[in-house]
Amino acid sequence: MSINYIRDKRSPEPSSSIASKVMSSIQAKNTKPEIIFRKLLWKNGIRGYRLHWKNVAGRPDISFPGKKIAIFINGCYWHRCPKCNLPIPKSNAAFWESKFHKNVRRDKEKREILESLGWMVFVFWECEIKENPFPLIKEVKSSIIKN
C-alpha cells in the first residue's frame, strides 16, 4: 500500500509511516523542557516574562523585555548539544547533517544579534533542565535582580 505524505518539501520523504508520525509530533513551541522551566520560574517568583516574543530578534523562548534578558531552551537533538553529542540519523545523513549545521548557525546568529543589541542571553539545554534546573533558575533570578 502506498502512502501519500503531506509534505512541505523541506525534508526528505519519511522512510515509514511511523517515522512520519514521530516527525509530525515534534513541537517548535511549548516543549516539555520549556514548560518545566517556566513552571519553575513561576514557582520561584520570577514573573513578567513574554513567550516567543516577536518584537525582538530571534524570538526567544522566554524574554524579559524590560530587563533585556532572553532565554532559549534548546532541545539537545535539534540544536546539537555539545554535552550529549547525539548521533546523526543514518538515513538521509547528508540532509540531516546540513539541517543540524543550519540550526546551530542560526542559534549562534540569534545570540550574537541579541547581544549586540545589549541583551543578556541564556541558552539552557534540555539535558540541563532534566538533570538539575535549579542552578539555571538561580542564574536567571540573579540576572533579573542585577538589571
Image: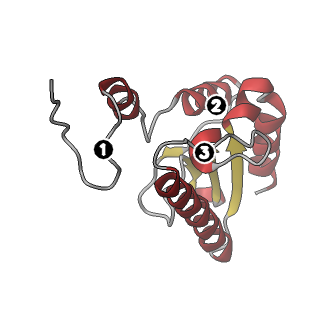
Using the image, tell me which numbered label, if any, was put on residue 88: 3
Q: Residues within 10 Å of mark 1 (few under 14, many from 20)?
A: some
Q: Name which residue lies at 59% across and 70% down.
A: 109
User: Considering only order in the chain, which callout, 3 or 1, is on the residue closer to the N terminus?
Assistant: 1
Residue 85 place in picture, x, y as percent: 74, 43
Residue 94 place in picture, x, y as percent: 51, 57
Q: Name which residue lies at 79% across and 48% down.
A: 145
Q: CA distance from mark 1 to mark 3?
A: 17 Å
Residue 5 place in picture, x, y as percent: 20, 37
Using the image, tell me which numbered label, if any, was put on residue 68: none
Question: Which residue is tagged 1?
Answer: 13
- Whether 142 is drawn above or below 38: the answer is below
Q: Name which residue lies at 68% across and 40% down.
A: 86
Question: In what quadrant of the picture does the C terminus appear?
Answer: bottom right
User: Considering only order in the chain, which callout, 3 or 2, is on the residue closer to the N terminus?
Assistant: 2
In front of the other: 12 or 42:
12
Q: Which type of secondary structure does the marked residue at label 1 adopt?
A: loop
Question: Which residue is tagged 2?
Answer: 37
Could you tell me the amino acid type at mark 3?
Ile
Q: Name which residue lies at 53% across and 63% down.
A: 102
Question: In what quadrant of the picture does the N terminus appear?
Answer: top left
Residue 34 place in picture, x, y as percent: 57, 34
Q: Which type of secondary structure does the marked residue at label 3 adopt?
A: loop
In front of the other: 98 or 75:
98
